[in-house]
Image (spheres, helix red, strand yellow):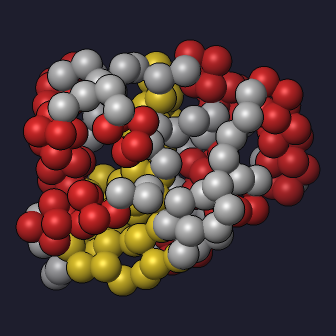
Amino acid sequence: MKSALSKLALAWLERGRRKRFAGDLFQRFEGLEPVFLRSPGATVLDIGACDGLVAYELARRGAAVVHGFELDEGDVAFARRLFRDVPAESAFVATDLTQDPASFRTRHADVLLESYDIVLFLGVYHHLERQTSAEALDGFVRVLAGMARSLFAVRTKQLDRVEPLLLEAGFTCTSEHAERDDVGPLRIYQRAA
């Protein structure tokens, strides 16, 4: 792989030219260290993968499989280019997560594994909350929690809505990082053994 820092820096510059995102690259990575430490050999599901920069960092640190889902087709195309020379198995899919989120597994059975070591749900909850019913969104979070074998990382200002669903699914919060500027708070949950 090319130098990870230079590849990420170039990716960030290209990304910034296309549209505005909350926070900078470093703020978006803050607090994810426990996830990065668990990445060697891991399978990763990234919901709201954006352009694949967080997924790329997991792959750079040894994740074996990375599957990402994102609404924006340009971001998906960028993530695919970013992963072109990455040895991890990867698939990035453009999809509208608000369209019947309960059927997510069925609609994407051709890509999805039965379960993943790590599920990322970073900065996407508030977007879905504005576009789908609370019941549908709760159902989607339950589906994702059911797919997470070990870690579930969520970044949102609506943690009070997500946390009860994760606790109900047998997770415990093991790490949290406070909100910073435009980037919402992060919590990392681990499934009880």
Give how far across and how far down residue 168 sits, in percent. 9, 67
Q: Is residue 118 visible?
A: no
> Vertically, is 39 above or below 88?
below
- Residue depicted at x 40% and y 71%: 188
Query: For the point 71% across and 53% down, which residue is it?
Result: 23
Residue name at image x 24 percent, y 79 percent: 172
Q: Position of residue 28 (x, y in %)?
A: 65, 58
Q: In the figure, is residue 98 to the left or right of 101?
A: right
What x and y, as percent, mark residue 164?
Answer: 17, 66
Q: Is residue 145 left or right of residue 95?
A: left
Q: Is residue 146 shown left or right of residue 53?
A: left
Q: Is residue 192 left or right of residue 77?
A: left
Compared to 188, does 85 lie above or below?
above
Based on the displayed image, in which of its 4 quarters is residue 114 positioned? top left
x then y, percent, for residue 5:
85, 56
| Along the line of sight, the residue nearer the viewer: 124 or 174 | 124
Residue drawn at (35%, 32%), measured in percent from left and top? 130
